[in-house]
Image: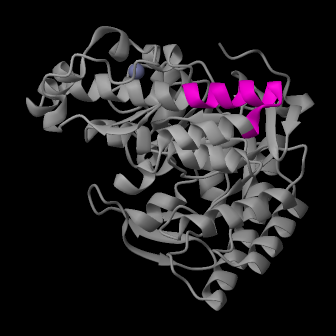
C-alpha cells in the first residue's frame, strides 16, 4: 500500500549502501511503495502484466519491483485513462514498487516512420499507424500520469555498431534531453501545469549514461549526467549486439565513474551469467525479458545450465526442471509433463515455465545478496559460472 507522503519533503527515494565485496554492492532503496533490496532484478511487465504471470506469483517468486513499458501503456490504454484510474499501481493492482522506462527504446525499435529532431521523436504507432510525438517533457508527463516509483529520462537509442562521431552526437543529444527531463520533473514537483496529473508525488527519476562502446564518450556522458543530478543512474545502449567482453568493460568503467551513493541500473541485461558478472562490476539493478520470453519458447534456466523443454530427452524424464528450485513448477511437475504441455500448445506451459525462470532469476539475486553480505561473493561467482558451464554459447 502506498504510504501517505508529504510533497514538501521531496521524494522519499533513499538509497542505502549496506555492504560491499570487491566492486559488488549490497544495498536497498526506499520508494513510496516500499523497499527494494539490491542487487535487484525487475521482471518486465510490458502491458501492465508480466506475461503469463499473476501478480500473486510474482510476489511468491520474490519480485520486489516490476518494470512497465511507457510506450505500450501510452498507446494503449493511454496514460490519461490510467491517471483517471488513480495511476498504474491502482490500475493494475500492484502495490509494490514500479519502474517505467521513457518509451524511447520502443520508439526506436518498434515504431514506424520515426524522425528524430532536437525537439524529440515523431513516430507512427505500430498498432494503428497513428502519429505521435515523444519529447523529453512529454516522456516525463506520461510517466507522471502513470505514477511509477522510478521514472527514466528520454534518451536516444543508437543502433549498434555506430561510428565514434555518430555515438558522440547521439550521446550529447541524450545529455541535453536528460537536462530537459530533469527541468520538467522539477516543474511538476513544484506546481504541475494544468492537464498534467501527478499520480505519485514521490516519483524518483534516473538519468541514463550513453556513449556506445567508446570509453571516452561513456566518461563524458557519465560526468554530464551526474552533473545534472538524479536519484539514480542507468547505463543504456548495451546488450544490443556488442561482444560480451566489450559490454563488461563498458559496465566496469562506467559504474566506477558513477556516485557511490546512488543506485546503478544496467538496462536490458541479461543472462544469469551477465547478472553475476555485472554485479561483480558494481551494478545494482537489472531488467530483461529473457526469463519470461525464453520460458514461453521452452528454454529453462537452471542451476546446472539451460535446458530446452521440447527436447526428446525430456519425454520420459520424471525429474523436476531444477531439483535445487523451490518454485511451484519444480515442486509439483516433471520435465515430461512440461514437455507434453509445451508440445500440446497448452497455455499452462507458458505460465509454469515463466514461473520457474522468474524464480530462478530472483533466487539468483537473493543468493548474490547473501554472498555479498557474507563477503563470499567471489567464491559464489566462480561456483555459479562453473555450474552454469558454457550455457551462454548453446542457447
Ligand atoms: Zn523452479
Residue 48 part of the magenta-drawn span? no
Tell me if residue 87 can be seen. no
As displayed, is residue 382 above or below residue 253?
A: above
Q: Position of residue 54 (x, y in %)?
A: 39, 19
Q: Quadrant of residue 175?
A: bottom right
Q: Residue furthest top?
A: 332
As displayed, is residue 142 above or below residue 54?
A: below
Residue name at image x 55 percent, y 46 percent = 273
Tell me if residue 30 can be seen. yes
Q: Nearer the viewer, residue 334 or 73?
A: 334
Residue name at image x 60 percent, y 52 percent = 267
Q: How is the image coloured?
A: one colour
Tell me the quarter of the image containing the N terminus.
Answer: top right
Q: Nearer the viewer, residue 250 or 115?
A: 250
Q: Which residues are magenta?
A: 363-378
Secondary structure of the magenta portion, mostly?
Answer: helix
Residue name at image x 51 percent, y 29 percent = 84
Q: Position of residue 59 (x, y in %)?
A: 52, 16
As displayed, is residue 63 above or below residue 159?
A: above
Q: Position of residue 80 (x, y in %)?
A: 50, 39
Task: Judge left or right: residue 330 versus residue 225.
Answer: left
Q: Nearer the viewer, residue 344 or 120?
A: 344
Q: Position of residue 160 (x, y in %)?
A: 50, 76
Q: Nearer the viewer, residue 283 or 203?
A: 283
As displayed, is residue 379 above or below residue 57?
A: below
Amino acid at each position: 500500500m502506498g504510504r501517505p507522503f508529504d510533497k514538501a519533503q521531496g521524494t522519499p527515494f533513499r538509497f542505502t549502501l549496506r555492504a560491499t565485496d570487491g566492486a559488488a554492492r549490497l544495498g536497498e532503496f526506499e520508494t513510496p511503495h516500499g523497499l527494494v533490496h539490491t542487487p535487484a532484478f525487475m521482471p518486465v511487465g510490458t502491458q501492465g502484466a508480466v506475461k503469463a504471470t499473476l501478480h500473486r506469483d510474482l510476489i511468491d517468486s520474490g519480485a520486489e519491483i516490476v518494470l512497465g513499458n511507457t510506450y505500450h501503456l501510452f498507446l494503449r490504454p493511454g496514460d490519461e485513462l490510467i491517471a483517471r484510474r488513480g495511476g498504474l499501481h491502482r490500475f493494475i493492482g500492484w502495490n509494490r514498487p514500479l519502474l517505467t522506462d521513457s518509451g524511447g527504446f520502443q520508439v526506436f525499435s518498434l515504431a514506424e516512420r520515426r524522425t528524430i529532431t532536437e525537439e524529440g521523436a515523431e513516430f507512427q504507432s505500430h498498432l494503428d499507424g497513428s502519429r505521435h510525438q515523444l519529447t523529453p517533457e512529454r516522456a516525463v508527463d506520461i510517466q507522471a500520469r502513470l505514477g511509477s516509483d522510478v521514472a527514466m529520462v528520454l534518451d536516444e537509442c543508437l543502433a549498434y555498431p555506430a561510428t565514434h562521431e555518430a555515438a558522440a552526437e547521439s550521446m550529447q543529444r541524450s545529455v541535453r534531453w536528460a537536462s530537459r527531463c530533469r527541468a520538467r520533473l522539477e516543474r511538476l514537483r513544484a506546481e504541475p501545469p494544468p492537464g498534467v496529473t501527478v499520480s505519485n508525488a514521490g516519483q524518483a527519476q534516473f538519468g541514463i549514461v550513453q556513449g556506445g562502446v567508446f570509453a571516452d564518450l561513456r566518461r563524458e556522458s557519465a560526468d554530464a549526467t551526474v552533473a545534472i543530478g538524479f536519484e539514480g543512474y542507468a547505463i543504456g545502449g548495451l546488450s544490443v549486439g556488442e561482444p560480451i567482453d566489450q559490454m563488461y568493460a563498458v559496465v566496469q568503467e562506467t559504474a566506477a565513474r558513477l556516485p557511490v551513493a546512488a543506485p546503478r541500473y544496467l538496462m536490458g541485461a541479461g543472462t544469469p551469467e551477465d547478472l553475476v558478472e555485472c554485479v561483480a562490476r558494481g551494478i545494482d539493478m537489472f531488467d530483461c525479458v529473457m526469463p519470461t520470453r525464453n520460458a514461453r519458447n521452452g528454454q529453462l534456466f537452471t542451476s546446472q545450465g539451460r535446458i530446452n523443454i521440447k527436447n526428446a530427452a525430456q519425454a520420459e524424464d520424471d525429474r523436476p526442471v531444477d531439483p535445487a528450485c523451490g518454485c511451484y513448477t519444480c515442486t509439483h511437475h516433471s520435465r515430461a509433463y512440461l514437455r507434453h504441455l509445451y508440445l500440446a500448445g497448452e497455455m499452462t506451459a507458458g505460465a509454469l515455465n515463466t514461473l520457474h525462470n522468474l524464480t530462478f532469476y530472483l533466487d539468483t539475486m537473493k543468493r548474490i545478496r547473501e554472498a555479498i553480505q557474507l563477503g563470499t561473493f567471489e567464491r559464489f561467482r566462480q561456483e555459479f559460472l562453473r555450474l552454469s558451464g558454457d550455457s551462454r554459447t548453446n542457447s
